[in-house]
Image (cartoon, coloured by chain):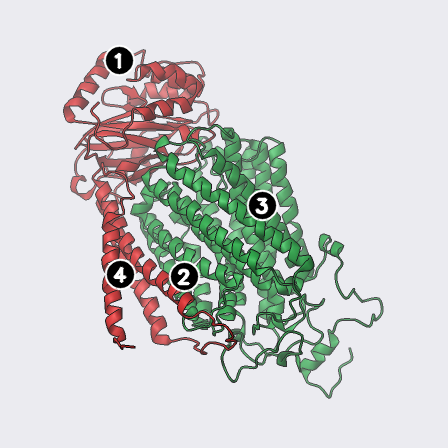
Amino acid sequence: MKQIPAPFWTLVLGIAVTLISLWVGQNHNLLPVQASEQAPLVDDLFGVMVTIGTALFIVVQGAIVYSMIRFRRRKGDDTDGPPIEGNLPLEAFWTAIPSIIVVGLGLYSVVVFQEMGGFSPGGHHGHGAMVAMAPQQSVIDVAPLLAQMGLGESADADVYSKTQVYGFGASPLVQMNQPDVTVNVTGMQFAWIFRYPDTGITDGELHIPVGKDVQLKIEAQDVIHSFWVPQFRLKQDALPGEPGELRFVATREGTYPVVCAELCGSYHGAMRTQVIVHSPEDYADWVASRVAEATPTTTVAQPLENPSDAEYLAAVVKDRPFGAIAPDLAKSPVQIAQMDHAQMDHGAFANH
Amino acid sequence: MFKPFNKTRFMAQAEVSIKPTEDQGGHGHPDKWKWYDYFTFNVDHKVIGIQYLVTSFLFYLVGGFMAVLMRTELATPDSDFLSPELYNAFLTNHGTIMIFLWIVPAAIGGFGNFLIPLMIGARDMAFPKLNAIAFWLNPPAGALLAASFFFGGGAQSGWTSYPPLSEITANLPQTLWCLALIMVGTSSILGSVNFLVTIWKMRVPSMKWDQMPLFCWAMVATSILALFATPVLAAAMVLLLFDINFGTSFFKPDAGGNVVVYQHLFWFYSHPAVYLMILPIFGIMSEVIPVHARKPIFGYKAIAYSSLTICLVGLFVWVHHMFTSGTAPWMRIFFTISTLIVAVPTGVKIFSWVATLWGGKIRYTTAMLFAVGLLSMFVFGGLSGVTLGAAPFDIHVHDTYYVVGHFHYVLFGGSVFGIYSGVYHWFPKITGRMLNETLGKVHFVLTFIGTILTFTPMHQLGMQGMPRRVAMYDPQFADLNQLVTVGAYILAVSVIPFYFNVLWSWRSGKEAGPNPWNALTMEWTTDSPPIIENWEVLPVLTHGPYEYGMDKAVQVGPAGEPTEATQV
């Protein structure tokens, strides 16, 4: 048997593992399209973790498989293996390497977190006032909040200036600026309501312009929901009584799903709508058309007496683009979500 | 008390506490337990261990049945098989049963109670009655969960039961659920005290701390963790119970309460709970691998201390379950770093087991296959765990199928594989009979394939945008979900050869003898099944637990012959 020195094989294997890991880290294709400024930051972090993970996976699984084959008991051999009880340098090595890796990953995570705006939620409030949750008779009774939503602008309590705000705020680059668009997002069983305090628009879908600094102020009305747009890589729980914020710049026009990620009741799976990222012109057109349509009585200031969730929703989304489906909403959120889905392209460009 | 003074102190001890075969003054109990003794308030640790194991294996079937129904629902995007309420009740109770009535009682209650006294040379646990009480809290807890389905359709707010949802949905079942959790929590606290005192005080005098089998170290770490964390869960459950039934408003935001506080209380227990479910399994790994690889465990001290490190660090990582919830930026960072640190002691264990395999003479027993299968699964589950620990990425995949895939890799691929491995390894000791190896291998192959097929695609589903706990989902995810459902059916089938094997072998398996694996830990020095009070004369430690291949080691003799260790 020809003797090739062990270090040679170790080197070859090491290079192979490194190349495979780097390739997997770049080409795993596991994540959906990137549609926000935060998305590439998150994906790069994930790519690094996949690279390191692949290398460790190959090495450890390789050692397991190799041992299972090479060191299997042969027929008739009832003796024991060599009495090796440990090896201090080796143990120090495999304690030190993961330690270095996790410290590195930890620091990298902090950097990404900071660039995403993770350190500044609630830093700048914009001018759209989020209404404080007034005491309600019951957690699911929407009437008091509904009344207040009509008075949103004049409500005196601005929880965003008083309380800790959770989520992602402005990235360090735009920290001194006001957001271009502010949207108040309210989660309720089982729908999202988007209100634009600047224009008084209320909608069941989120419309935002591409390339602009958007601030979402996230609240929940009944139970905990979680606002998630996979293509933005952003998620923030909508907590009753605790304000949340997501601030981001959408980088890609298109229609993407808005998903509720926190179990919120029987139709949690159907609590889906969509976010439409418009070109600035289309967005201006959309705003203009919605403002033109809107009269004070059709959108928000409808003081229904104790409406059910569904009645309330039917009222506020009556004139949304898919207005025809609003009556259905009162019956089945599932059907709505599925109809919405038919119009959604999950990241491919779509012009609305 | 009579003490013969021509013998050593140790012998005297043994003499005094010897099993009363010659019935003295009515203080005798039978030679062997009858079958009906296993259904009574029996204080023998072995009976209690078997009670835990059998009960938990029954609940495993119940929880698994729920999983199969849920996967059937998820074979199509529409909600067309179960009502959404029933689906939520199944997902809630699947989680609750699998954690609190399957893995925890099987790993801690079952193996812990059966093995700890046998491994340290004790005749029973320190507090036998407390031990029996701890077990008998479990069946009523299960009954409460079953009742919750008949009185209001089962709790529906997830095993996490976050308020306000848990306070406005299915109040009576939710109340029963809280009571069930308080009972299993109490059981866990009582059991932990017992393990700690037993290991601390009742080792045979000849056994030093560093001669203890690593399973005992794992149980020390597990018990400390349970003692610190479980009372907090009990507190959370009591507060939730009061909010639902007695008009308090601890977690009601519209009455001054705070919903995030519950999450802190819940996860302060429930993150350590994942270590409660894996540390005893790590202990099982450290016992099974050296025996079947015929090599000493590699890095005894590193493995023992890494259990304690995981126990300590594991108490400070709970907020990583709340990265998208109401958590301040500094918390997201602090808990990212602390979470990543857990990877280091866990890695030490994995590397040590791989090094134990390296150079051994590996026997392809089913126990060993499951142990190596666990190792393989856990590498993947551990790495996906690291990605979840990094807050920026967790923000994207939190509450998605990525998380579901990850924790099933570590809890099914980890804990359940470990329990299987332990059953194949210690079944001969527990029952005196061998399990059928052919059926065992069929079981292993089906489980291994089923696990990969079920839980791997879940990662991709989550990253692509599928949230967890949904009865209806976006049709673009249908293909991967069908693959997962096929995997789940394979897993459902995989338990058939196992349960058949256990039932059949318990009656008619091959006689095992005291030490069929030729293992060196102390439980193998007594009969299989062990006699009541474990040994006629307590054994003396003559060698460490893992001294395979050492000339100085006293090999335990072949089955049936008296061993060096018992010849006092």
Indicate whether B524 appears above or below A260. Answer: below
- Residue placed farthest to the front in the image? A1
The correct choice, above or below, for A34 with respect to B431 in the image is above
Q: Is residue A13 above or below residue B18?
A: above
Q: Nearer the viewer, residue A30 or A81?
A: A81
Residue at figure coordinates x 51%, y 28% from the top left: B83
Q: Which residue is mark 2?
A: B346
Q: Which amino acid type corresponds to the residue marked 1 in the rendered image?
A: Ala
The numbered mark at residue B61 is 3
Q: Residues within 10 Å of mark 4 (few under 14, many from 20)?
A: some
Horizontal and vertical percent position of residue B558:
62, 76
- Return the residue nearer the eye: B189 or B296: B296
Q: Amino acid at mark 4?
A: Val
Q: Residue A150 is drawn in which quadrant? A: top left
Is residue B318 shown left or right of residue A89? right
Mark 1 → mark 3, Cα distance in angstroms: 57 Å
- Closer to viewer: mark 3 or mark 2: 3
**Do the residues at discs 1 and 3 belong to one chain?**
no
Residue placed under numbered mark 4 in the picture: A17
Chain letter, disc 3 residue: B
Chain A on-screen colour: red
Horizontal and vertical percent position of residue A122: 27, 38
Identify the mark nearer the N-term, 4 or 1.
4
Q: Residue furthest left?
A: A281
Q: Colour of chain B?
A: green
Query: Residue extending furthest bottom?
Result: B6
- Asked whether, in this view, residue A251 is left or right of residue B62, the answer is left
